Image: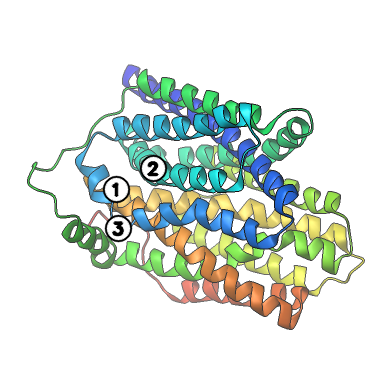
Amino acid sequence: MKKREEWKKTFTKIMIGQSISLITSSIVQCAIIWYITYETNSAFWLSLSTLIGFLPQGILGLFIGSFIDRNNRKRIMIYSDSFIAFVSLIMVIYGFFNNLPIWLIFICLGLRSVGAAFHSPSLQASIPLIVPEESMLQYSGYSQSLQSLSLIISPAIAALLYGKMNLSYIILLDVIGTIIAVFTLLISNIPNPRIESQQKENFLNETKQGLKLIVNNKLVRYIFIIITIYTLLYMPISSLFPLMTVSYFEKTTFHAGVVETVFAIGMLIGGFILANTKLFRNKRKNMIISILIMGIAIFISGIVTKNMYWIFVILSFIMGFSGPITQGTITTVFAEQIDPNYLGRLYSNYMSLTVLIMPIGLLISGSLADVVKINNWFLITGMLVMTISTYMITNKISFDKEKQ
């Protein structure tokens, strides 16, 4: 009983620190987007900032998984968090004396992305070392809920602060949030997996080994294929919500904000229900149903008329609700299927896949949505997403196999 309470305390401490850091980082992200918008009034510079903020993480993730698996994951998280705080502090100090130039913001965004490349998979790979396997699905739900909470409150806090204080002071909040995250890691005991023999590392070979984890495990390979296609379709749709609201429904930016907030509330509730009920214990059904619900909601969004904005708001809630169920299930399956010693490699590859596929999806979606009209693109995408769930229904692969 005592051992059980200990891992719960450890998980809680780490998640509190990470949640505070995530919220402050999200606030800064919103503020930086607005700053670039007002300084440049250019969609190009906004798109470039997004690319710079994600591309280093996507590329590095292909190669650093073996480094994470070979080393103390707690230390990697502490060092990477500290590096991110240091980079943010550079912007804070510079901003106290001068207006922050766009070039400096871009450099710092890229460097923060490098830190995130080490931190995010280390955190994901550490959770299965803390949480027992039978509780992974539940606590994945809690983790998804905390992420959703940051999406709900961060834009509101950012909007409140941006008009009243210098950007440097807002960035300072992120420094403080990161320090809190480091402190909670320092006082937490994270078990270490078996460290591989300290032979000379060949990152190219070990990258190949990380990819073999995906290829050689039938279930993991299957999920990677499904999620690659799903991410290619779904991720761009979420970025088109504001355009759908303003262009198709002819509403204001306020109404676009309502859609984003309701979507995040749906994510919060979806993660909470995943964690606290037994409705989603069957992992195969979880993915099939959640992807199907997502597809239906996107499809209906494409056929509602221009005077049905509030129907779109409800559909946005449904889309948000289904997301954590899909993601929480994937996290649990990976933890069950792969030896903890190799989870760093798996999660870094998974995160790289997500990050690198996003710009491809955005490019395709942005181009085609202009040609076929935004509402028709929602309709087409919804049909394609539903096709994924239909394929999964016909494929009888088990989600409950032993580690391979």
| Residue at the extreme right of the image, as rendered | 307
Q: How many marks?
A: 3
The quadrant where residue 249 appears: bottom right
Question: Could you tell me which residue is drawn at 70 percent across and 76 percent down?
Answer: 369
Residue 305 position within the rendered picture, expressed as x and y whole percent measured from the top left: 88, 72
Question: Could you tell me which residue is drawn at 70 percent across and 65 percent down?
Answer: 297
- Neighbourhood count class around disc 1 (C-alpha, 10 Å): few under 14, some 14–19, many 20 upward: many
Image position of 67 (left or right of 24): left
| Residue picked out by circle 3 | 401
Location of the N terminus by quadrant is top left
| Residue picked out by circle 1 | 343
| Residue picked out by circle 2 | 124
Vertical position of residue 31 compared to residue 360: above or below: above
The reply to whether residue 281 is in sight is no
Considering the numbered disc 2 on the image, is that residue within a helix, a strand or a loop?
Answer: helix
Residue type highlighted by circle 3: Lys
Residue 87 position within the rendered picture, expressed as x and y whole percent measured from the top left: 47, 35
CA–CA distance between discs 2 and 3? 21 Å
